[in-house]
Image (tube, helix red, strand yellow):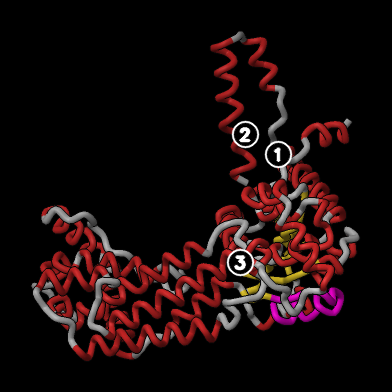
Amino acid sequence: KKHTLLGKSLIKPCAKDIVMCMLDQESSKKVEAVPLSNNTVTRRIHDLAADIEKELIFRLHLCDAYALQLEESTDVAGLAVLLVFVRYDFNSSNEEDLLLCEFLQTNTTGETIYNCINNFMKTHQISWEKCVDVCSDGAKAMVGTVAGAKNVAPNCTSSHCILHRHALVVKNISPSLKNVLDEAVQIINYIKTRPLQSRLFKIMSEDMGSQHTALLLHTEVRRLSRGKVLVRLFELRHELSANLMDHKFQLSDRLTDFLWLSRAAYLADIFTKLNEVNLSLQGKNVNIFNAKDKILSLSRKLQFWISSVERNDVDCLPTLNDFLEENGYKLDEDIRSDIADHLHDLYTNIIKYFPNINDNNNWIRNPLSLTEKPVSFSTQDYENLIEIASDGQLIQKFKVSLITFWSDSRIFILSRCTIRQLLPFASAYLCETGFSNYAATKTKYRNRLNAAPDMRIQLSSIKPNIKRICQEKK
């Protein structure tokens, strides 16, 4: 209840004091009359959430198409929570919003999840036929949900979250490199899990003038953890070696082992590069085209890195290159082979999990680039596209925004097709950030909270219509 009581216990007394100082006691009494009890604040949260939902449903009735993104998780009270986000076209732009936050009362099968969403659609008379795509994390329950959606939405496609696929690409690692990663985690845990050792290590790092004074714990479920952990470990290798000198720790010699450090430096480099790609795939309004560009770029870089390493050129791996130059060493042949094999595996996994990086829809992003009629185009469609590419006013819109360009009423015939290509979510990023907000709102101290209205207000891009809410209360 703490967040609903802050108005009464903290904000109102401060407001009274301000009004007392700036005006008079009579005005301060008027502030006192403002109702801010727990029940009042809770009721207002529900009113705001209901107004936002009302506006969202109104927009979904008006739009030509929409795409869904969904994910399920378990909260601190052990309840199964389903988050569904929707992306739809509205006022010549693609809008993203929370469609529903629901608790699954029993199991979390695909049928249960589909029924939950379907009940919401039927209650608010939202047509399934407008649904063009459903994005999920690829779990079995989600696949079942998508199958149910396709039964009522024949034109609906399904997509596997690009962040999950990227995680699958980087998951596999050779035994020699995996052993270095595991040992690095053990070295970090030896310091981090012992408070005294952590304090002593911090003091030593400060005395040695280090940029950082603490190591980072590795967490497998956090996709960016590997890169950050290894980079920090490699930066503090001298401090760690000095700290562990007097300890009977079996892995202390690794910090002076050239072969081990070479592999650790490579892992720090490659996971940093992979993290950069992962971060570029995150965020709002990322569509399939943006995501495919990033993956295509990564696949081309991998080919370049492979050819460079095979030539014994490691300039593309700055941490490893600096380490070798600093110590005057050459890259060991076995390590070079391990690096080349790992890069080959990454490239193979890219092809496996992203088989359709190159597609035939580039004309959507640049209608001027099409010089001959695609096989999938009818004669009428191609003639319309030629007209579009020759319209100077439309091309000016094209330079501003793809959505604005294709939403123009003069190209309605082709725009319906292109908007459907731009609507699908590339990842389940919104659901993942939504669950982070949910965990921060519903804590173990407030485990009986129904957080659905709070989530509606926090995660929605629609502003509540305060005037309409007040008029309805009269």
Whether the magenta-drawn stretch holds residue 153 is answered as: yes
Residue at the disc numbered 3: 289
Helix, strand or loop at label 3? It is helix
- For marks 3 and 2, give the one nearer the viewer: 3
The answer to whether the residues at label 2 and label 1 have Cβ atoms under 8 Å apart is yes
Q: Amino acid at mark 2?
A: Gly
Magenta segment, prevailing SS (helix, strand or loop): helix
Crowd rating for badge 2 (residues with CA inside 10 Å; few <14, some 14–19, many 20+): some
- On-image quarter of the C terminus: top right
| Residue range (magenta) | 142-158
Q: Left or right: where does residue 168 sit relative to residue 51?
A: left
The image quadrant that residue 109 belongs to is: bottom right
Residue at the disc numbered 2: 7
Helix, strand or loop at label 2? It is helix
Residue at the disc numbered 1: 41
Name the residue rendered at 82%, 74% in the picture. Answer: 378
Depicted 338 relative to depicted 445: above or below? below
Q: Amino acid at mark 1?
A: Val
